[in-house]
């Protein structure tokens, strides 16, 4: 009789754990639904619709350019080859270019390895794509910070293209965006859903650590953006002063 009781208790515990898991998953889906209905969720949905519209417009423009290029090739070959050969070459070119356009139209979300290997000019854009794909299941404060970090990265994108990849600033931004940020989010995702809101020995939950980490990343990106902005202003001032000294009336008179 004791053996039966001993067998039943583990089964009861397992059943409770399974039920708790289903409850957590249901709660997560419910929270996701509420977030999508919130003003922040509607704003995010609007931005995603606008991004899809921009992608479709770019796709249509590229397809039109492909058609024009194929027609030009056909027109240039017609005087030197038979109509059938010219048509075959133009059609093959159109098929090749169309395939390339569709393959590159909607790039896959980069993984951590691809993110770390991305060239500095494209790092911010790739990081925004990666971060947007990590939103599911995050608590609301983290989602707000994800949006803030995305905006910081958008602001940094043109400046990163002009930054020397070998400079300490470039190394610091790359480590923050391509190494430390993915490590934070992936580490949080490894925590079971049922344990993400359980306080640990330090009194904070894994959700709290995620939010705190994203706050620090947002603040560091803001600091980096300010520093790069000041460097740009200094360069403009130096260039302006140089032009004044070189081309001002006083300099010419000397």
Image (cartoon, rainbow, N blue to C red):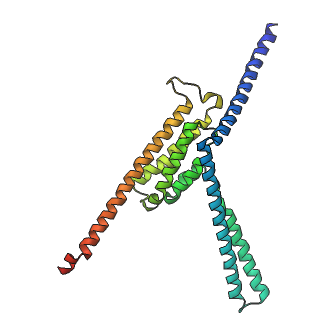
Q: Residue furthest left?
A: 254
Above or below, 58 relative to 5? below
Residue 28 showing in the rendered view: yes
Q: Position of residue 6 (x, y in %)?
A: 77, 12
- Looking at the rendered image, the quarter that the N terminus falls into is top right
Q: Position of residue 98 (x, y in %)?
A: 70, 70
On the image, which quarter does residue 106 sit in? bottom right
Give the residue at x 47% y 48%: 175
Q: Position of residue 211 (x, y in %)?
A: 52, 36
On the image, which quarter does residue 54 sit in? bottom right
Which residue is at the front of the view, 127 or 116?
127
Which residue is at the front of the view, 143 or 1?
143
Which residue is at the front of the view, 80 or 151?
151
On the image, which quarter does residue 237 sit in? bottom left
Give the residue at x 63% y 49%: 45
Residue 109 showing in the rendered view: no
């Amino acid at each position: 009789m004791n053996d039966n009781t001993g067998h039943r208790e583990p089964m009861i515990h397992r059943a409770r754990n399974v039920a708790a898991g289903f409850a957590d998953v249901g709660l997560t889906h419910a929270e996701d639904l509420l977030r999508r209905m919130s003003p922040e969720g509607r704003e995010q949905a609007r931005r995603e619709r606008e991004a899809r519209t921009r992608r479709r417009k770019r796709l249509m423009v590229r397809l039109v350019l492909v058609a024009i290029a194929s027609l030009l090739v056909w027109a240039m070959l017609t005087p030197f080859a038979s109509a059938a050969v010219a048509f075959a070459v133009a059609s093959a070119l159109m098929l090749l270019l169309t395939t390339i356009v569709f393959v590159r139209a909607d790039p896959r979300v980069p993984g951590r390895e691809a993110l770390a290997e991305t060239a500095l000019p494209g790092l911010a854009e790739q990081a925004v794509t990666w971060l947007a794909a990590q939103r599911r299941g995050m608590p609301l404060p983290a989602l707000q910070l994800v949006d803030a970090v995305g905006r910081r990265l958008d602001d940094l994108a043109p400046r990163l293209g002009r930054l020397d990849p070998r400079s300490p600033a470039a190394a610091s931004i790359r480590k923050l965006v391509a190494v430390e940020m993915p490590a934070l989010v992936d580490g949080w995702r490894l925590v079971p859903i049922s344990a993400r809101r359980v306080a640990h020995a330090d009194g904070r939950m894994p959700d709290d650590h995620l939010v705190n980490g994203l706050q620090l990343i947002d603040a560091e990106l803001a600091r980096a953006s300010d520093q790069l902005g000041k460097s740009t202003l200094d360069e403009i001032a130096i260039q302006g002063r140089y032009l004044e000294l070189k081309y001002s009336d006083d300099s010419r008179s000397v």
